Amino acid sequence: MMFQKFRNSFFLILIFLLNPLTLNASSLPEGYPKCYNSDISKKNYCPLNAKLGHKIFLVDFTSRWEQPQIDWVKGRIFGEGLIADTPPYHKISYLKIDNKPPHSQKFFYSKCRFKKGNKSQKFPGEAVSKKCEGVDVVKSIFEKWNKQMKSVEEGFFENVDAEQSLIYEYIVHLLRESSADFGNEYKTRELVIVSDLMQYSKRVNFFKHCKSAKMKLKPKDQQKADKCQSFEKLMSKEKSFAQYLNSTKPNSDMVKNLKVKVLFINHAYEHEQDLYVTLEKLWKDMFAYMGINNVEIIGQIDFKP
């Protein structure tokens, strides 16, 4: 009897001691690296046996940026804002929209976010694994990764002269091409688009579609985008575009577990205010038509009166 009580007490103590470890392990996704020295690539800090998540920043440099816009975007896609919003060992990639076609463009940077080595309620995997990792080593690797990111930030913001703004084409390229490494084998995928959303190409011309009847009465050299018509009108009036969209849009597998966030660059000081309300609605409807329903659009506040 005494032995049975002792045995029960022993098992209760054992369960109590192991429970935090069990909870911590269960809170980490399958394939999460247990030891940085054996479970991640030394080249890109990514897990060797899992694809946990991939976040791509697609940044449109085909319109001129003002310093307040650069500052706003920097705070969201680099530095502490990036680290606080991205779990350890999730891949982070930066791709520019400029004067190159999508299939000729290369990632400006594409590696996984290394962990900080501190305990975190938000990201349990942030902490050091005491079985096979040293705190000082982990923190030194994080600092090395963080310096790389600061170097990327310093060289990233450069405007270009571009005849086209191939926003739609870049989005579809990332979702369709295996070279982008953005497939649904990743447990989570997020596409962060930084743009004024003014698509301009021979097939998809929003400068043409986003002019009111009043604006079209002005001389051509005085006309500018001021108000977009609906997505339905775009599809019905521009048959070539409708056919292009239907033949190139991603299928359901390509948009599975995909989140899209748009950092909507504000050029309201150059355009009519109605443009941005109608342009946002136009893109939301177009995303829905493409099967992308998890969409968040964050507009930049006006920075000029």
Image (cartoon, helix red, strand yellow):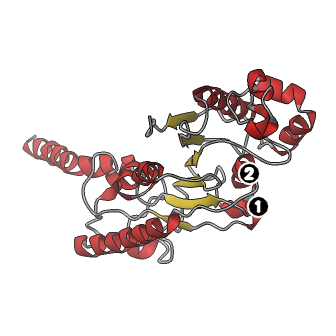
Look at 41% across and 52% down and name the residue there.
71
Q: Nearer the viewer, residue 42 or 206?
A: 206
Query: Callout 1 environment at 10 Å: few (<14), some (14 to 19), or many (20+)?
Result: some
Marks 1 and 2 close (CB-CB < 8 Å) = yes
Marks 1 and 2, Cα distance to the nearest angstrom?
8 Å
Q: Which disc number belongs to residue 262?
A: none
Look at 71% across and 53% down and name the residue there.
170
Q: Position of residue 301 (x, y in %)?
A: 44, 36
Give the quadrant of residue 289. top right
Q: Quadrant of the N terminus?
A: top left
Query: Callout 2 environment at 10 Å: few (<14), some (14 to 19), or many (20+)?
Result: many
Left or right, residue 211 beside residue 53:
right
Look at 81% across and 37% down and name the residue there.
220
Residue 137 in sight from this viewpoint: yes
Give the quadrant of residue 265. top right
Left or right, residue 218 beside residue 52:
right
Q: Which residue is mark 2?
A: 166
Left or right, residue 41 beside residue 202:
left
Q: How many dots with numbers? A: 2
**First of labels 1, 2 by sequence position:** 1
